[in-house]
Every structure is written in structure tokens, then in C-alpha cells.
Image: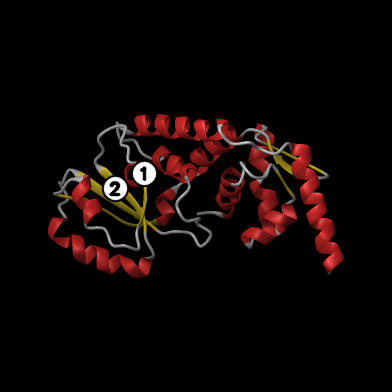
Amino acid sequence: MTAKEAVWRHLLTHRRHRLRWTQQELARFLGLSASQVHAALDVPRRAGAVAVGGRGLTLNDWKKLLVIWAVFRDWRRDVLWDASFAASASEIEGEMVPEAVFSGPSALKFARDIAPADYDRVIVYLPQADLPRLQERLAPLEDRRGPTRLTVLSPDPRQPAPLPLEQVYVDVWQLADWWAAEYLRYIMEALEWEESTTTMPSPAAAGERSSNSAQSTASSS
């Protein structure tokens, strides 16, 4: 995952608690340079998803930022293994090593006990060191003409746990499978519902807290 995506994910997954950040705060929190954060904000700013001013940046339209992330996401660079199997998605999930973190339909199945449609693809994040063990476990089921596909992605070092629903949405966006639209629709509805049930701070209050925090940091130093 790129530095830009890390910034976008952070703004999206923290939006219910904080609306305003400074670029320096984001850089420090994510372990990025100020120039990387500045570059990450270019497209969202021009699209109106975020506003950047003297007092920091404000997330104005989380849905627009989510779509920007989904469109720019290209997980091909993160794929560690992609294979087909003579087994169902449930069977592949049942053989998964414990270090794997499910994304896509499997994430909804296990985290929310729901599957809006049948699916034939399993997506997981897994450290490369654990991949040989998974490959050995699934070797008897591997079949290039099999009906179920497994995609193993390398997790990034800043990846939150559990996997945020926003990232599941972005991962499903990458798929051309017939059932992907049903999952995108459900995830968006779930995100909208969570947004409507969360009391969010006003931008003014968020900015005041950010200013007080900065003053406190300056005083202590």
C-alpha cells in the first residue's frame, strides 16, 4: 500500500472522532515525511473531499475520499499468491492459517455474520513469512481450473487491526466478479448507518482540540 493510501485510510477510519488534522500530525503519526502527506492531499483537495488551510486540513466528504482511494488502489503490487482451488470458499476459509486477516466477502462473513450474495473468491492479508505454511496446507486442493480463487495480499506495516470496513470496501472495488456490486452496496449502507449513529465533533471543536494539543506539546517541550 502506498503512502497516499495510508493517509487516506487514516483520515477515513478516524473521521468519527476527529475532523481536523495538521499535516505535521499526520506525518508524525504515520511515520511519513511532510512531503508525502502533502502529495497525498493533492487529489482529495482538488476534488473537494478535504479542505487544506492555515489551521490544518478538514475532511469534508468521506464518501468522495473513499471512492478516490478505491479508484487509485492497485493491489497487484501487494499480491503474494493468487491461485484457484477445487474447493468452496468456505472450505478455503476453513483451511486458513491463523495469521491471515480476511478481507472481501469473508471479512463480512466472520465479522458481521452476513453474506449479501454467494461468492467464489477469498481475499486475505498475510505476512510473507507465513505464506509457505498456507501453500503447503492448501496444496492438495490447488487446481488451475477450480471454481474458487484465493488472493493473498501483503499487509502494510500501518494496517489497523481489525481490518477497517473502509479497506474491505476498497478491496472489493478491485473485483470484477458478479457479486462484487452487492457487497459494495451493503458495505456502503453499513458505513452510512455507522455515520448516522455516531456523534461527531464540529470542525470548530476539532480545531480547538488540535490547537490546545499543539500548545500543550509546545509547553511541555
In this figure, which residue is indicated by the disc labeled 2? Answer: 122
216 horizontally vs 62: left or right? right
Q: Which mark is residue 104?
A: 1
Q: Which mark is residue 220?
A: none
Which residue is found at the position 63% from the left and 33% from the top? 61
Is the C terminus in the top left, top right, bottom left or bottom right quadrant? bottom right
Using the image, determine if residue 221 lies above or below residue 61: below
**Mark 2, residues whose alpha carbon is within 10 Å: few (<14), some, or many (≥20)?**
many
Percent position of residue 194, x then y: 52, 35
User: Mark 1–mark 2 contact, CB under 8 Å?
Assistant: yes
64 horizontally vs 180: left or right? right
Which is more N-terminal, label 2 or label 1?
Answer: 1
216 horizontally vs 183: left or right? right
Residue type beneath disc 2: Val
Q: Is residue 94 visible?
A: yes
**Residue in front for this viewpoint, 68 or 182:** 182
94 horizontally vs 211: left or right? left
**Residue in front for this viewpoint, 84 or 220:** 220
Using the image, determine if residue 203 lies above or below residue 137: above
Spatial CA distance of label 1 from label 2 is 7 Å
Query: Label 2's element?
Result: strand
Percent position of residue 9, x then y: 56, 47
Percent position of residue 127, x then y: 39, 64
Query: Label 1's element?
Result: helix
Residue type beneath disc 1: Gly
**Mark 1, residues whose alpha carbon is within 10 Å: few (<14), some, or many (≥20)?**
many
